[in-house]
Image (tube, rainbow, N blue to C red):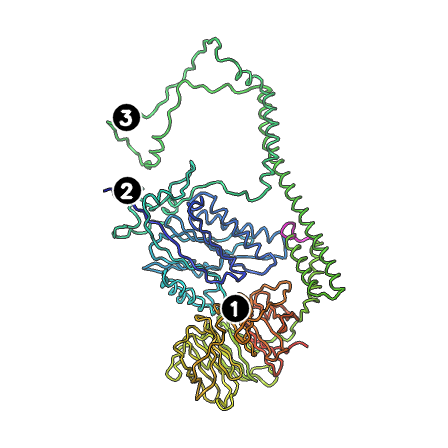
């Protein structure tokens, strides 16, 4: 019975850590060509772009860089590491060109690319990104800490591209992420999660890693590699390159010895695993063949070739008339009478004797490498009796030389004309876009004449979009600058942008390694949850709320033991007022990741709050208090559990707040507030409103630029109160009423204080808005 031949192929299991609905999720692209796609011979490609800086064309820049990297990788030839380096260099040129075309754009980026091809993993990166490669024996971090922030792309200097190569084995795992991961968590925690990841627990590890980021949406990709056997017939159907210059597929990378005697990378029958080949050998062997791109990157090339076709025909006709003797010689019949032409005497050519194969004789090497000797043996001998044609002389020779000089000059002129024409086309399109933007400003005036502010805002947004597209084509002109200033002024008035002038001096400054995440205020007492140090700190202000009088430090931190219960990772805090007949002291409620709730006040200190049926809870990420009732948002069961005070604690079983017909989705929940209705903010910026267990139709009024990352919100409990949304991307606070209508927005007068916006708290008694950022804590009266 014939034996069936088997080969081993690598299967990739992937999971993204950021919700696909988040606008920044598009900054991570996974290209996994299916079988039958000719790109499959080059394997999978994963691209993560971490953009540094804000610009109206940020998304456009990311798309252009990703498309450039993909095109280069699947079309260029050479070692995989060099192809990836070239791809990142091409993306650098795209971003640098965009910055040069518009002086107002100063974007830079970190890029990391991972290629999975023929059982190998090759990573290349430049700028602030991070990767972890986990095997059964070790964990590698790439790039190293001192290399991570060097050589961002998009600047005037060439990027510093680092590469890493790895031979994949069954069960290996890869994590790609933006640099913020190392700030939100520590390397040991992230690396431990990657090492522990398998196909079966991948989703659990994704949830765990999201928790390490304190539910702040971060770009990340988790990959697990497994090996599968495929039969000979299946392997034969693999779409390998068939071009003449294509290299054969590499299944096993040989070492320094000849590939004829190479040892397989892995003994599939249980033998020992050989050592990884040297980097130089792998770079030489692991090579992808060059092929023509599927799609031309621009129409200007086609126009240039069409323009070059005309002079080539003209030169062909010109040469046909200028060289009549050669043409006539080609047209003479072959049956001419033979003329006696003396054979030129040529000196005998000394050649190495070619010995018969049956009787080889070793030749002295004299230190010449074996490869050079092989190339010398493959040299073809000169053809005896060959004499080159007589060179052209006289006028014809001078004419040919002149034509040879004119050809490259005329070619350069034609190509230059094509580029100029392309520039003229861009100029025409850019001017048309500027005219469209100008026409939109007329629509704004018409809308304002009938007090239609919503239409006016929409028209201004369209006008700004046209100008952004024009900037990409023709850069910033005087007319564009003038229109942009008009749009900005009109938007300032329509959007009711209010500057906060009392943010010059913070109540509190934080160290660089601090990660303040939540804030709760009661009278003069301020409590802040720091997710970095995993501690809750207490402060007390003066009566005017302008200065801190007390800094009591940490009142509770992870690892403390309270009433015999160990405090887990801290996730949320809320304020519990006095409850008549149940609790005579107001307290701070603290939630940890183990579903424990602790209570703190200055008289009793920290105590553990006993909950009925606590063991049935899944993964509680948010808590809230309303009318003495405790609300816990369980992300695992997608349910909000409500506890009513009873006995000495919450002794009664909880009730499910969502209606049975409501399919709640609490994954990625980052904030919850209650005013009778329950308001939920997700990490993708979606704000939902529920009443009596049912979801209400709700959609914030669209305004220009609404699309930034919302990280927290605060609101007044009374029905006609306002919503205050923390927009961390645009460093502003948006104000809406509870009927979804846009009211106004707050910005810092100096454009400094609101950087790194993290949290909000509204003190309705004093009408003071507390603003928490990564670097400080501010208190500002609400503008009137």
Among the 4 quarters of the image, the one containing residue 302:
top right
Q: Is residue 387 above or below residue 487?
A: above
Which x, y percent locates residue 338? 46, 9
Kindly report the distance in space between the C-alpha atoms of the residues bearing marks 2 and 3: 27 Å
Highlighted range, magenta: 470-477
Task: Give the label, 3 or 1, closer to the camera.
Answer: 1
Q: Residues within 10 Å of mark 1 (few under 14, many from 20)?
A: many
Mark 3 and mark 1 lie on one chain; the one further toward the N terminus is 3
First along the sequence among labels 2 and 3: 2
Q: Is residue 181 visible?
A: yes
Pointer 1 residue: 682
Disc 2 marks which residue?
A: 261
Q: In the image, which disc is placed on residue 355? A: 3
> Mark 2, mark 3: which one is toward the viewer?
2
Q: Position of residue 364 (x, y in %)?
A: 28, 32
The reply to whether the magenta stretch includes residue 246 is no
Is 104 left or right of 217, judged from the image as shown? Answer: right
Is residue 473 a member of the stretch shown in magenta?
yes
Q: Determine the main secondary structure of the stretch shown in magenta.
A: helix
Q: Residue at x 34, y 36 (%)?
A: 371
Q: Residues within 10 Å of mark 3 (few under 14, many from 20)?
A: few
Local crowd size for mark 2, using a 10 Å CA cut-off: few (<14), some (14–19), many (≥20): few
Classify residue 548 by image quadrant.
bottom right
Residues at marks 2 and 3 touching, judged by CB atoms closer than 8 Å: no
Question: For this rendering, which residue is in front, 63 or 256?
Answer: 63
Structural distance between the alpha carbons of marks 3 and 1: 81 Å
């Amino acid at each position: 019975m014939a034996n069936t031949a088997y080969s081993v192929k690598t299967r990739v299991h992937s999971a993204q850590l950021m919700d696909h609905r988040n606008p920044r999720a598009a900054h991570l692209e996974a290209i996994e060509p299916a079988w039958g796609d000719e790109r499959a011979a080059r394997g999978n490609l994963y691209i993560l772009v971490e953009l540094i800086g804000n610009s109206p064309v940020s998304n456009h820049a990311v798309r252009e860089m990703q498309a450039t990297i993909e095109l280069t990788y699947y079309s260029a030839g050479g070692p995989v590491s060099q192809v990836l380096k070239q791809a990142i260099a091409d993306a650098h040129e795209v971003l640098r060109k965009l910055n040069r075309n518009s002086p107002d754009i100063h974007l830079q980026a970190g890029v990391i690319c991972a290629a999975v091809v023929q059982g190998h993993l090759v990573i290349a990166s430049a700028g602030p990104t991070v990767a972890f490669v986990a095997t059964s024996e070790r964990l590698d971090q790439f790039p190293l800490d001192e290399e991570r922030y060097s050589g961002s792309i998009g600047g005037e200097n060439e990027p510093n591209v680092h590469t890493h190569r790895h031979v994949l084995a069954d069960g290996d795992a890869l994590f790609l992420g933006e640099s913020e991961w190392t700030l939100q968590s520590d390397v040991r925690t992230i690396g431990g999660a990657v090492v522990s990841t398998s196909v079966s627990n991948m989703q659990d590890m994704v949830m765990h890693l999201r928790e390490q980021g304190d539910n702040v949406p971060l770009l990340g990709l988790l990959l697990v590699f497994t090996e599968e056997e495929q039969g000979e017939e299946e392997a034969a159907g693999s779409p390998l390159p068939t071009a003449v210059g294509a290299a054969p597929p590499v299944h096993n990378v040989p070492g320094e010895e000849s590939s004829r005697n190479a040892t397989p990378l892995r003994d599939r029958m249980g033998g020992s695993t050989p050592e990884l080949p040297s980097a130089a050998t792998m770079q030489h062997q692991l090579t992808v063949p060059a092929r023509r791109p599927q799609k031309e990157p621009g129409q200007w090339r086609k126009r240039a070739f069409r323009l070059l076709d005309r002079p080539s025909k003209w030169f062909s006709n010109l040469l046909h008339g200028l060289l009549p003797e050669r043409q006539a010689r080609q047209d003479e019949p072959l049956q001419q009478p033979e003329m006696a032409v003396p054979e030129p005497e040529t000196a005998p050519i000394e050649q190495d004797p070619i010995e018969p194969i049956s009787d080889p004789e070793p030749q002295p090497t004299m230190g010449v490498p074996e490869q050079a000797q092989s190339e010398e043996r493959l040299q073809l001998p000169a053809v005896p009796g060959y004499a080159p044609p007589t060179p052209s002389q006289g006028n014809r020779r001078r004419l040919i030389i002149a034509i040879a000089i004119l050809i490259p000059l005329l070619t350069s002129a034609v190509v230059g004309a094509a580029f100029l024409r392309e520039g003229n086309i861009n100029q025409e399109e850019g001017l048309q876009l500027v005219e469209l933007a100008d026409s939109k400003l007329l629509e704004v005036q018409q809308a304002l004449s009938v007090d239609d502010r919503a239409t006016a805002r929409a028209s201004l947004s369209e006008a700004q979009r046209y100008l952004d597209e024009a900037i990409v084509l023709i850069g910033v002109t005087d007319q564009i600058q003038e229109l942009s200033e008009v749009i900005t002024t009109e938007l300032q008035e329509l959007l009711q942008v209010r500057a906060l002038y009392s943010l010059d001096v913070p109540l509190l400054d934080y160290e660089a390694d601090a990660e303040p995440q939540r804030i709760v205020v009661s009278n003069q007492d301020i409590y802040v949850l720091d997710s970095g140090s995993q501690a809750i700190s207490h402060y007390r202000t003066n009566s005017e709320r302008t200065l801190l009088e007390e800094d009591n430090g940490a009142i509770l931190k992870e690892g403390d033991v309270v009433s015999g219960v160990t405090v887990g990772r801290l996730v949320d805090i809320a304020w519990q007022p006095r409850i008549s007949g149940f609790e005579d002291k107001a307290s701070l409620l603290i939630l940890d990741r183990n579903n424990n709730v602790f209570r703190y006040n200055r008289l009793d200190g920290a105590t553990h709050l006993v909950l009925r049926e606590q063991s049935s809870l899944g993964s509680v990420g948010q808590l809230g208090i309303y009318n003495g009732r405790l609300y816990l948002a369980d992300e695992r069961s997608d349910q909000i559990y409500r506890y009513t005070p009873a006995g000495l604690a919450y002794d009664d079983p909880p009730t499910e707040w969502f209606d049975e017909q409501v399919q709640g989705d609490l994954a990625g929940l980052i904030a919850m507030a209650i005013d009778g209705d329950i308001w939920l903010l997700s990490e993708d910026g979606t704000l939902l409103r529920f009443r009596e267990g049912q979801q209400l139709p709700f959609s914030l009024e669209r305004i220009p630029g609404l699309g930034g990352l919302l990280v927290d919100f605060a609101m007044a409990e009374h029905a006609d109160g306002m919503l205050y949304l923390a927009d961390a991307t645009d460093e502003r606070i948006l104000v809406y009423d509870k009927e979804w209508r846009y009211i106004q927005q707050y910005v810092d007068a100096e454009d400094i204080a609101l950087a790194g916006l993290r949290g909000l708290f509204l003190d309705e008694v004093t009408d003071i808005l507390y603003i928490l950022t990564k670097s400080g804590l501010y208190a500002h009266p609400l503008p009137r």
